Image (cartoon, rainbow, N blue to C red):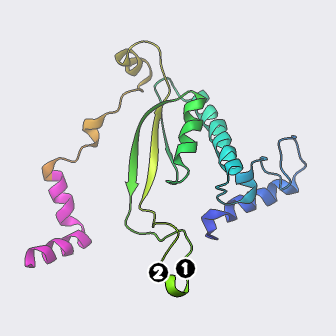
Amino acid sequence: MGKSWDGKDIEDRAAYLASMPLRASACGPNGGHRSIAVEAGKYDLTPDGMRAFRTFSLEWATECLRVLKPGGHLLSFAAARTYHHMEVGIEMAGFEIRDQIMWVFGSGFPKSHNLKGDHSGWDTAQKPAHDPICIARKSFPGTMAANVAAHGTGALNIDACRIHGADAQAMWSTTPARESRTHSLLAR
C-alpha cells in the first residue's frame, strides 16, 4: 500500500545490507535473505511469496524456541490474510499452538481496489477489523506445577489479568472520552 511500515523499513535494511559484502549464498540481490516476500519489501500473496513467509516464520520461531525457557510463551501478530502461514511456521519450529486472541479495531480501510464507473463503491476486499495473535508455548517435561516451580513459566496467571467490577467501573468513569460518552448515553 506504500505506507512506511509496508516497505520502507525493509527497503532501508536491504540497502544497508547491500552496502556490505555478501557473506552467504542465502543473500538475495538486495543483500537481504533470499525470500521473495522480504526482497519485494511488501506483501507477496503469490504461492511462492507465502512459502517464503512460512519459511521466514519457521526460521525466527526456531530461534525463539531455542532461547525460551521450558514453558515460555510466544505471542506473534499477523495479518488476517497471512496468519495461517505464520502459525504453521511457529508449529513446525516445535511450539505447541495454545490459542489465538484477536486485536479488534474499528479503524482501517479496505486494502483493495475501488472500481469505477457503474460499479463505483464496489471494492475487491473488506476493511480489516482485526489482527490475529498466535499464542504458542515451548513444551516442557514433567508437570505444569513442577515447571512453574523450576522456571516460573508455562501457566498463565489469568486472575492477575482480570479487571474486577469496581475497577472496571472506575476505569470507565474516569476516562474523559468514555466519561463524555457515558453522559451522552445517560442523557438519552
Query: Mark 1 and mark 2: span between their CA atoms?
Result: 6 Å
Task: Report the residue marked by disc 1.
Answer: 115
Marker disc for residue 121: 2
- Dot 1 alpha-carbon crowd within 10 angstroms: few under 14, some 14 to 19, many 20 or more: few
**Image quadrant where one finds the C terminus:** bottom left
Q: Where is residue 186 in the image (x, y as percent from the top left)?
A: 9, 74
Q: Residue 46, relative to residue 7: is it above or below?
A: above
Residue sitting nearer the eye, 115 or 126: 115
Q: Position of residue 13 (x, y in %)?
A: 74, 57
Q: What residue type is labelled 1?
A: Leu
Q: Is residue 169 magenta?
A: yes
Q: Position of residue 122 (x, y in %)?
A: 48, 76
Residue sitting nearer the eye, 153 or 100: 100
Residue at the image position 54 percent from the left and 29 percent from the top: 68
Q: Residue 177, relative to residue 116: is it above or below?
A: above
Q: Position of residue 182 (x, y in %)?
A: 16, 71
Q: Is residue 173 magenta?
A: yes
Query: Which secondary structure class fits the magenta region best?
Result: helix
Q: Does the residue at mark 1 contact the one at mark 2 (Cβ under 8 Å)? A: yes
Q: In the rendered image, which quarter is residue 23 located in?
A: top right
Question: Which is nearer the N-term, disc 1 or disc 2?
Answer: 1
Outermost residue on the bottom side: it is 117
Residue at the image position 47 percent from the left and 71 percent from the top: 109
Outermost residue on the right side: it is 21
Q: What residue type is labelled 2?
A: Gly
Range of residues picked out in magenta: 167-188
For residue 143, side relative to residue 43 (left or right): left
Outermost residue on the front side: it is 118
